Image (cartoon, coloured by chain):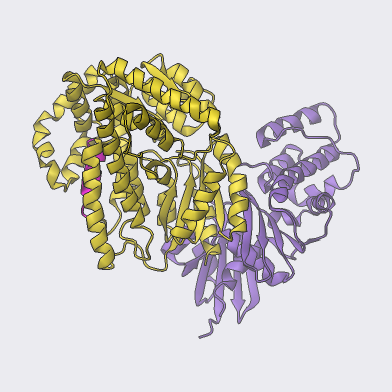
Amino acid sequence: MVEIRVAGIDIGSRTTKLVLLEEGKLSEFQIVDTGLNPLTRSKELLSGHRVDRIVATGYGRHLARTHFADNVITEIKAHAQGAHFLFPQCRTIIDVGGQDSKVIRIDENGLVEDFEMNDRCAAGTGRFLEIMAKTLSFKMEEFGDQAMKTKRSANISSTCTVFSESEVVSLIAGGEDRKSIALGVHQAIVHRLSAMVDKIGLKEDIVFAGGVAKNRCIASILEKRIGAKLCIPKEPQIVGALGAALTEKT
Amino acid sequence: MPHSLIFWLRQSRCVDCIDLLREEASLSNYEEMWKKLGLDLTRHDELLESLEGTYESIIASQRNRPKTMAYFDESVSVAHCARVKELVDRKSKGEKVIGTFCIYVPEEVILAAGATPVALCGGTQFSIPYAEAMLPRDICPLIKSTLGLGLGRMCPYLPVVDMAVGETTCDGKKKTWEILATMVPMHVMEVPHKKEQIDRELWSKEVRLMKDKMEAVTHREITFDTLKQGVGTVNRKREALTQLHDLRKGPVLPISGKDALLVTQLALLDDSERFAGKVEKLNEELEERAKKKVEVFPPEAKRILVAGCPMVVSNWKIHHLVETSGAAVVCDETCTGFRYYANSVEENAADLDELLENVADRYLKVNCSCFTPNQERVDDVIDLAKKYSVDGVIQYVLQYCHGYNIEAVKMEHALKKAGIPILKLETDYSEEDIGPLRTRIEAFLERLD
């Protein structure tokens, strides 16, 4: 029996992503803020579409299973499946979301071999960028581009987001150029990611996913750091939801 | 009157404990007892309430449990009242109670002196803040929990023991005995770091020193006969547990990993002879269940071996996460598992000296990461993984534990080489990381599909 319309829903702590598969092909997707009520938001998202099966992933997946999802998988498996579908040569995934980051090693069939997650510390996640952008009075959408406008970076030495924010404030007060501080912030986040990347080890092709993958500055610094090209999906935020939907494919 | 106690006692279905229920009238005597022991009654009551909640949601809520588990449920519910009273009554007859914190400490020698061994290790998050008021935060949760129970005056066992026997296994414990010594008389055994000839000689001497200490504190001589009796008792307990855990090797699982863990945790707390008898009864029921194919997990449930640090009573965190994610824990290579019950003491001996040597020998076979290079433990885990037909191994490391954290590296290499999937989890006693742990465990189980 072939499922006609499968919905994959990735309920994150900041954003909820919906992907619709029709006969194995991506037909639509949507990204909304999760807000304070993930259940309500998910139902709202789904209500606009006719779906036969729903697979949920992300931090809100168990809630989804209780109320409407037919199946749940972890965001690890979801990203593995999604990245494999988009880039069949993918063997490593670096996913940096709003509040977590992960590195996943997969095999030629998109099956997970190993993974490393950071979901306890804001440093190395989108949150870090958000806080610093605000402190530097940059909009998130322009933060990466602004950082790329300078070649000189101001070093951020703190590992903790809270202390880094204080450091940034001091640098601003000391008259340091905002763009240089921005570049320093971007280098700091890549530095945090490197530790996780080193633990798993890299094997090409390497896919860069998650909201942070939209930031060209991060992508550029990361590529230099790992010494390899990154494959970045057109819509890096929906890789998890896509992967979830794909697991129902027959 | 702590309502939690009444709740537990009323929950009891254990026929052997009907007498205890009749003693409901004397529940108020327990408050007197706790007061006499110097406990902070408010904190103690809060501790019991939190334990009751944990027990209900994690242990008691399981389906299709063996009927004979009722005794072990009862043991937990009376741990702070009737069991403590039992020890207090023994003390009034001149018997001593000796606290321990580690499975390297020979129970046989304590029993040979006519004393009762009881483990003082903490398994609850509740007492940790009391230790964090004194110790740095970056220390093993087990150590903090244990110390906190004493500092917070929430544990009835600490004031009951006549002496506690510590050991120089890890740095954290070694230095904590210095603080604990201000609260209770302490004897510290020097456990060697290696298993060469000089280390064996040291350990042999340490066992004899401990024997002398036990004689001094109990005012009783340890003879060949009394030690032989002690050895027999603990061997019986180990054999009963070995049989219990053997019954988890087959495709039909008659008992959950949580329940098997609970029973093993209680081995360090209960009266040895009584406990052994109850485990033997449990084993009879489990054999019947296995024959009749009464299983607590479906055959397709993934089989997991947990290797690493000990899990003390009320710490069922990892087993709970694994067993509510559709998998079963079938083996524990921990101090509250295989390392506790494996290997008996050789009972054949010509005299007391030889028997003491046999005791020392047996204990040096325990392969904790406090020893180096400890290749034997890696071999044990691979061997157990095969014997229990596991689908994967979870390395359980208590937060900040250097020994098990670093040993985890070579364990991972060896298991990968043997083709056995492995996941390492470093965690504490709190609820904070339940979500992240669950994600990792579920992702690991997805890999095993």
When the figure is inspected, residue B84 is found, relative to residue B7, above or below; the finding is above
Residue A55: image x %, image y %?
52, 68
Which chain wears purple?
A
Residue located at (9% from left, 38% from top): B19
When the figure is inspected, residue B332 is found, relative to residue A173, above or below; the finding is below
When the figure is inspected, residue A133 is found, relative to residue A1, above or below; the finding is above
Residue B171: image x %, image y %?
54, 26
Residue located at (75% from left, 66% from top): A234
Which chain wears yellow?
B
Q: Main secondary structure of the magenta part?
A: helix
In this rendered view, identify the residue nearer to me: B302 or A236.
B302
Q: Residue B69 lies in magenta, yes or no?
A: yes
Residue B271: image x %, image y %?
24, 35
Q: Residue B265 lies in magenta, yes or no?
A: no
In this rendered view, identify the residue nearer to me: B298 or A45.
B298
Q: Which residues are magenta?
A: B67-78
Can residue B69 be seen in the rendering of this structure? no
Can residue A96 be seen in the rendering of this structure? yes
Question: Going by the picture, which residue comes out furthest to the bottom?
Answer: A1
Residue B15: image x %, image y %?
12, 47
